[in-house]
Amino acid sequence: MNHSHFNSLIHAPNRLHICAILSTTAAIEFKLLRERLDVSDSVLSKHLKSLEEAGYVAPAKRTDFGRQRTWLSLTPKGLEAYTVHVKELKRIVG
């Protein structure tokens, strides 16, 4: 029996893109991530909430120049899940 490592939570297009971006950096500001995805605040927030509830994304609030900003990073669990999912996608299409 073949056990698939396909992760349906990560696979949704915006969440897959979020994980791909976060996998290449230590942290990224919410605003920059929103701009790179070209989505609204509410759409990004909804996807991030799903990833955060799974333990894949960790938000951090920081104050810069008197303004509070949200920074996001992929947790070790999130990086592992993303890496395994990408490997499974390559296996499926390969």
Image (spheres, rainbow, N blue to C red):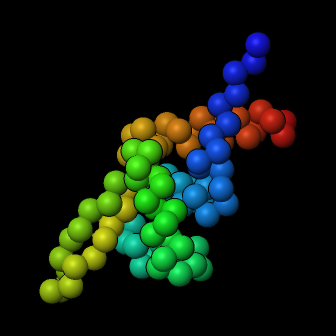
In the picture shown, does residue 94 fall above or below 22? above
- Determine if residue 21 is in view: no
Which quadrant is the N terminus positioned in?
top right
Residue 61 or 91: which is nearer the viewer?
A: 61
How many numbered circles are shown? 0
Farthest residue, direction left: 66
Describe residue 44's horizontal placement relative to residue 58 as left or right: right
The residue drawn where x is 84% and y is 40% is 93
In the picture shown, does residue 58 fall above or below 86? below
Residue 1 or 93: which is nearer the viewer?
A: 1
The residue drawn where x is 43% and y is 59% is 49
List x then y, in percent, for residue 25: 43, 58
List x then y, in percent, for residue 94: 84, 36
In the picture shown, does residue 48 fall above or below 76? below
The residue drawn where x is 57% and y is 39% is 83
Farthest residue, direction bottom: 66
The residue drawn where x is 44% and y is 45% is 54
Please identify the quarter of the rendering in which residue 5 is found.
Answer: top right
